[in-house]
Image (cartoon, rainbow, N blue to C red):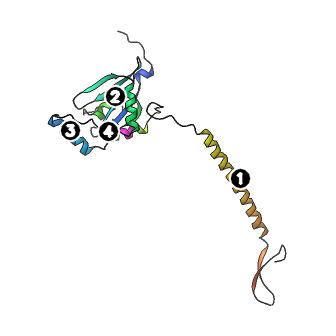
């Protein structure tokens, strides 16, 4: 079977990695689940105790979700309205979203652990260790964060007019400073002929100028 060639958008798609806290456990959850949640709350930074990834579907509207749990991994197609809820959570500070482009490492990358961090790292092709926390992965991806546009962040405000006014004010201030410096040099040049002399007959020290009457 021969597969059709794919574009870079398919072989190296952009994912949006979401960092958050796990959902509260339902009543009657197994004891091991409660122990795991307690460990996550005790050892990991608040707001960075879990991570998952999603990206737009290329063949249809909606999103593809990759969510590794402690027991399994969900790979689901979601409607577009899911992103509206995610944007609201991000705006309210309940999660952090970072854009990342997948890469294909040349060498084999052993992960050794089956955590959300190792799974997302393997999905993106970025390095990680068994002890890498979600917050450490967040900081690593943040350094390579690509522009997310208006999907998860507000569009950049056009500040060209304000920047132009600021540049003009700075230019005027520099020109005024140069004029004041020129006047000061002229005053100092006029005072260069002044000398300290003694008034005859009194012995008092006074200032007289060689350019005119003192």
Q: Which mark is residue 134?
A: 4
For residue 5, which quarter of the picture? top left
Q: Nearer the viewer, residue 80 or 51?
A: 80
**Image depth: mark 4 or mark 2 in front:** 4
Q: Upstream in the sequence, badge 4 or badge 3?
A: 3
Q: Residue at x 43, y 39 (%)?
A: 143
What is the residue that sits farthest to the right in this orientation? Answer: 212
State which quarter of the image contains the C terminus: bottom right
SS state under label 2: helix
Residue 73 in the image: state x and y as whole percent. 26, 27
For residue 134, which quarter of the picture? top left
The residue tagged 3 is 36
The residue tagged 1 is 175
Q: Which residues are magenta?
A: 137-141
Is the C-beta separation of discs 4 and 2 under 8 Å? Answer: no
The residue tagged 2 is 123
Above or below residue 178? Residue 37 is above
**Image depth: mark 1 or mark 2 in front:** 1
Q: CA distance from mark 4 to mark 2?
A: 14 Å
SS state under label 1: helix
């Amino acid at each position: 079977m021969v597969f059709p060639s794919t574009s870079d958008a398919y072989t190296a798609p952009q994912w949006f990695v979401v960092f958050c806290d796990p959902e509260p456990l339902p009543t009657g959850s197994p004891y091991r689940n409660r122990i795991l949640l307690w460990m996550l709350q005790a050892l990991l930074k608040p707001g960075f105790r879990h991570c998952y990834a999603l990206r737009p579907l290329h063949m249809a509207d909606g999103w593809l979700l990759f969510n590794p749990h402690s027991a399994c991994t969900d790979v689901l197609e979601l409607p577009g309205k899911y992103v509206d809820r995610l944007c609201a959570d991000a705006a309210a500070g309940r999660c952090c979203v970072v854009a990342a482009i997948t890469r294909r490492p040349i060498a084999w990358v052993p992960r050794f652990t089956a955590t959300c961090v190792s799974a997302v790292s393997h999905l993106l092709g970025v390095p990680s260790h068994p002890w890498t926390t979600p917050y450490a992965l967040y900081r690593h991806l943040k350094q390579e964060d690509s522009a997310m546009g208006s999907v998860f962040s507000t569009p950049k405000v056009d500040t060209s007019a304000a920047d132009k006014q600021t540049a003009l004010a700075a230019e005027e201030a520099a020109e005024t400073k140069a004029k004041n410096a020129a006047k000061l040099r002229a005053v100092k040049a006029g005072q260069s002929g002044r000398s300290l002399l003694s008034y005859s007959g009194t012995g008092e020290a006074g200032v007289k100028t060689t350019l005119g009457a003192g």
